[in-house]
Amino acid sequence: MIPVNQPLFSGREKEYLDQCIDQGWVSSDGPFVTRFEEEFSAYLGLKYGVAVCNGTAALEVAVAAAGIGPGDEVIMPTFTIISCALAVVRMGARPVLVDSEPETWNMDVSQVESRITGRTKAIMPVHIYGHPVDMDPVMALAEKHNLTVIEDAAEVHGALYKGKKAGSFGQVSCFSFYANKIVTSGEGGMVVTSDGAIAARARGYRNLCFKPERRFYHTELGHNFRMTNLQAAVAVAQLERIDNHIQIKRRNAAAYGQGLADIDVIKLPAEKEWARNVYWMYGIELKDEAGMDNDDLAARLQERGVGTRPFFLGMHEQPVFHRMGLFQGERYPVAERLARKGLYLPSGLALTQGQIEAVCRALHDIFARQ
Ligand SMILES: *Cc1c(COP(=O)(O)O)cnc(C)c1O
């Protein structure tokens, strides 16, 4: 079986973990946490990093730290992970959705302005599967309407938009370091910003809203969303290898691109001229001529020993939100199509060229028999 993800630990991960154990620093009070915050924010060219226990927590902390509250609206793509919408809902605010554009699968930024109301407080662009969102129009709208931009950059460590790193555009950005991300700490996340007030609030929410000057005295409710020194040790070692990880992702995407170019019933990932795609996951979309949906293709690939994951199901199709009275009757045709026609192929950093060739053979086999 070729798994959809296999992480790669080719750096100093074990050495740094040994240091944690030897020195007894295993909780969030440890030197690797600060070091990871400093090194990762510096990588993005931003001032502050606030490490947390996962990417979902990073989104919750960022939304809270940006001051989003009851009655506010946050514009985001429907085609994303539930973490984005739940961070907004948990603050008593309302996610307002836009569809994807069909080429990069990212939010269709041309639809954002029509969704802005007097209650809109923020735009949350989510960079999908390694390809950055078209940020210039997003930033221009945010400026025009005085909105905060909260980037979800969990899938784009090191991706570039017009030469600048994804996750360095908004007032605040969120990253995940889950096991399938380009930099992993097993589980982990970070809120990154150059805004000192946002960073300070984020540190508070991460750690039970203890007051720096008076511990065990609370004026607000926070969470325990801390990252441990053990996780940060792995993350620091991974960050040292990030250029190599991106190179592997791009090399593997090129190999898939070559191997699959002649299957004309599937659409391959795009890379706009203004982007460096880091191909976090190598997604493919079935064209109508393929005559099948992604669940059918996934089953056929599974029979041939190839693991896959379906694309996101849009937020407007989630029963949990319908029960809350959200998104009733809303339709987003591109996202609906992606949810039924898209899946991603094995894309882990430890994937071998032989495995990529085997996946391409399986796809040729399936589509030759059509
Ligand atoms: C992975 C991911 C998250 C959530 O990260 P976790 O660490 O799994 O909580 C959030 N947003 C996007 C776009 C992701 O891909």
Image: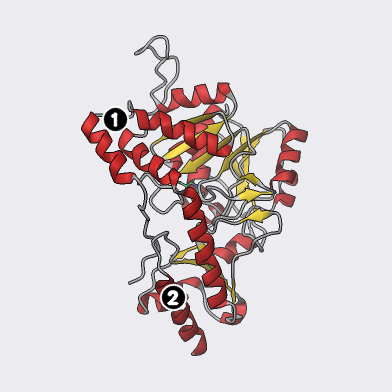
Q: CA distance from mark 2 to mark 1?
A: 41 Å
Q: Upstream in the sequence, badge 2 or badge 1?
A: 1
Q: Which residue is mark 1?
A: 27
Q: Is residue 224 visible?
A: no
Q: Is residue 3 depicted above or below 62 in this figure?
A: below
Which quadrant does the N terminus fall into? Answer: bottom left
Residue closer to the observer: 8 or 328: 8
Residue, x 52% and y 47% (percent of image)?
Answer: 157
> Could you say where residue 132 lies in the image, as x and y percent from the top left?
62, 51
Q: Quadrant of residue 250?
A: bottom right
Q: Is residue 227 depicted above or below 85 in this figure?
A: above
Q: Amino acid at mark 1?
A: Ser
Q: Check if mark 2's residue and mark 1's residue have beta carbons within 8 Å.
A: no
- Answer yes or no: disc 2 within 8 Å of ligand 1: no
> Could you say where residue 293 lies in the image, as x and y percent from the top left?
51, 74
> Could you say where residue 136 lies in the image, as x and y percent from the top left?
73, 44
> Could you say where residue 200 lies in the image, as x and y percent from the top left?
51, 21
Q: Amino acid at mark 2?
A: Val
Residue, x 28% and y 45% (percent of image)?
Answer: 14
Q: Is residue 332 visible?
A: yes
- Could you tell me which secondary element the residue under label 2 belongs to? helix
Q: Which residue is mark 2?
A: 359
